[in-house]
């Protein structure tokens, strides 16, 4: 019996690492910014043959940022939390 198993490649791991982060963290500017910085760092040090998927993820990130910006403009500013101070009598 012979078993053939497909091993994930570099592109698979990059997509796995960033796609869900961008999907679920799209509305958190800190998450998007840190993902962008990580992708840019990876792109900067990656060999040329591995930069394609990183550029793809950076493009997806830019699309995500634009979508969230449009959503924010359409829905208006997020209400700020109000703080109240209680005084003890």
Image: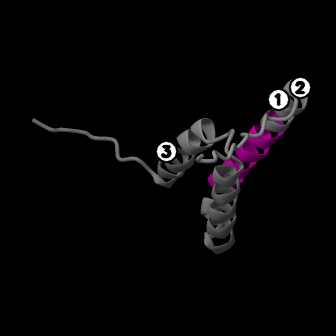
CA distance separating discs 3 and 1: 26 Å
Q: Name the residue under label 2.
A: 74
Number of numbered markers: 3
Relative to 73, is 13 on the left or the right? left
Name the residue rendered at 63%, 45% in the picture: 86
Crowd around label 2: few <14 · some 14–19 · many ≥20 (10 Å): few
- In this rendering, the answer to whether 46 lies above or below 4 is below
Residue 7: image location, x then y, percent: 35, 47
CB-based contact (under 8 Å), mark 1 and mark 2: yes
Q: Name the residue under label 1.
A: 71
Name the residue rendered at 69%, 64% in the picture: 40
Which element carries disc 1, helix, strand or loop? helix
* Image quadrant where residue 69 sits: top right
CA distance separating discs 1 and 2: 5 Å
What range of the chain is rendered magenta? 53-67
Going from the N terminus, do you reach mark 2 or mark 3 first?
3
* Image quadrant where residue 24 sits: top right
Name the residue rendered at 57%, 41% in the picture: 19
Q: Is residue 63 magenta?
A: yes
CB-based contact (under 8 Å), mark 3 and mark 1: no
Q: Mark 3 points at which residue?
A: 16
* Image quadrant where residue 36 sits: bottom right
Which element carries disc 3, helix, strand or loop? helix
Relative to 4, is 80 on the left or the right? right
């Amino acid at each position: 019996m012979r078993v053939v198993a497909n091993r994930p490649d570099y592109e698979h791991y990059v997509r796995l690492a960033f796609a869900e982060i961008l999907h679920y963290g799209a509305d958190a500017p800190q998450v998007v910014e840190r993902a962008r910085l990580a992708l840019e760092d990876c792109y900067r040090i990656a060999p040329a043959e591995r930069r394609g998927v990183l550029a793809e993820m950076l493009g997806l990130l830019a699309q995500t940022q634009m979508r969230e910006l449009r959503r924010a403009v359409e829905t208006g500013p997020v209400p700020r939390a109000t703080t109240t101070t209680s005084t003890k009598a």
